[in-house]
Amino acid sequence: MPDGAVASSGLCELQAVQLRDLMAEGSVSAVEVLSAHLERIERCNPALNAIVTLAAEEALLAARAADDARLQGRPLGRLHGLPIGVKDLVETAGIRTTYGSPIFAEHVPDADASLVTRMKNAGAIVLGKTNTPEFGAGSHTFNSVFGVTRNPYDPDRSAGGSSGGAGAALASGMLPIADGSDLGGSLRNPASFCNVVGLRPSPGLVTNRPVGDVWDPMSVSGPMARSVEDLALLLDAMAVPDPRAPMSLTPPAGSYRDGLEEDVHGLRIAWSADLGGLPVEAQVAKVVAAGRSVFEDLGCEVQDAEPDLSEADEAFDVLRALGFLASHHEKLVSQRELLKDTVVWNIQAGLELTPLRIAHAVSARSEIVQRTLAFFERFDALVLPVSQVAPFPVELDWVREIAGVPMEHYVAWQRSCSRIAVTAHPAISLPAGFTAGGLPVGIQIVGRYRDEPGLLRLARAFEAATGFGRERPPL
């Protein structure tokens, strides 16, 4: 049984790595860990609406099996006994998967997506599904099936998106780890809004099937957690080569937790306050700017610089529209009345594309990737804001204006993330502080291509020097 220091809901405050070690040594059981998180969900989820489908009975069976495995001396996975929430875009066998759409409101898949299989094989216990906007469209989590997810630091504010359910569940202690996905910021934005950590990995590092376009480098899956070490633990389980995924990468030998505490002195940091003149709210800019001295105190060489990302917005918008057309055109034809207006708009934008515009976008992306690779020959990392705004009122479907600058459409307010997505470089969102009103603000670190270990080391150094991620919301 757990002692007084980790009894009951106290388990929900521990890091995932601590929970895993406690369960592996038998100091606490997987059933006890699961029960603590189910109690936290019962208490917190009604106000936040982060976990939209709960699989308590299935999870309890899995937790008992995990405890039996330990008692029998069988090898334990990296995620042994850890409850995890799966984004409601990812298929889970026997557990409702709606994609946030009324079209699939009662959809129950027969099989797990390959990412879910991988996490289960590592010992994770699927506790339920986390909320997402319809088909993951937009960086604010709401849909007509389950409603809106609220921010644990202020329930009147957005939790971000599209992995907003995961972000809110992590911040409130309902989950120790969670998966997410990121096309234009959907792992990084909710991490920033909810004061947790979210990694957009290099394309191909974390594969998932079934998918639409197996060659698409824009939309990636990745880990979310409350600390860099927990995130690295989950990445170990996620980053497994898949011979049926043609872009699949082989991760480095060992663990992503290896070397996290290594010195970052002397690293060359490119600092960008606005990534090429993007509007940024003053309250966000103030918090992010304070992070510069942290890197300098760590011994890093910080210099104002940014890669040439001209045409990144056009490339992103075109390729996003093309993807929406490929994935959802049939729904527009047969069930248009069940689609939200921004999804309809994105599909129609795909229909209006010309071959020449598509070809230009593909060429522009290639040029941007090459320019960014050259940029990182001079720098070890690029640091900039995650989101250009702080968490906004939950009733607002999307941000219309930033610092007096109108936004042209519902994803334009996330250019600080979407421009980085076009580069194909890994990027992490870390807690960086709070606005005067107590709203979380994240800082984004972009690493060298396929250099997740180096990125995680720098992120861990910043995290250890600041400690903002330890400031949990009132529950």
Image (cartoon, rainbow, N blue to C red):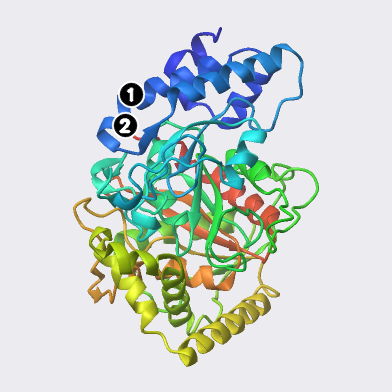
Q: Amino acid at mark 2?
A: Asn
Instruction: Indicate the secondary structure of the residue bearing disc 2.
Output: helix
Percent across and percent down for residue 311 are 47, 84
Q: 10 Å neighbourhood of mark 2: few (<14), some, or many (≥20)?
A: many
Q: Residue at x 29, y 62 (%)?
A: 335
Q: Amino acid at mark 1?
A: Glu
- Nearest to the observer: residue 394 or residue 126: 126
Q: Quadrant of residue 451?
A: bottom right
Percent across and percent down for residue 4 are 49, 9
Is residue 100 toward the left or the right of residue 340 in the image?
Answer: right
Q: How many numbered discs sit on the rendered protein?
A: 2
Percent across and percent down for residue 265 are 69, 56
Please say if 199 is above or below 13: below
Please say if 184 is above or below 167: below
Q: Residue furthest right?
A: 253
- Nearest to the observer: residue 64 or residue 387: 64
Q: Residue furthest left?
A: 395
Pointer 1 residue: 42
Q: Residue furthest front?
A: 334
Please say if 169 is above or below 43: below
- Nearest to the observer: residue 203 or residue 257: 203
Instruction: Indicate the secondary structure of the residue bearing disc 1.
Output: helix
What quarter of the picture does the C terminus occupy?
top left
Q: Quadrant of residue 202?
A: bottom right
Percent across and percent down for residue 12 are 46, 25
For the residues labelled 2 and 1, say whether their Cβ atoms are less than 8 Å apart.
Answer: yes
Pointer 2 residue: 45
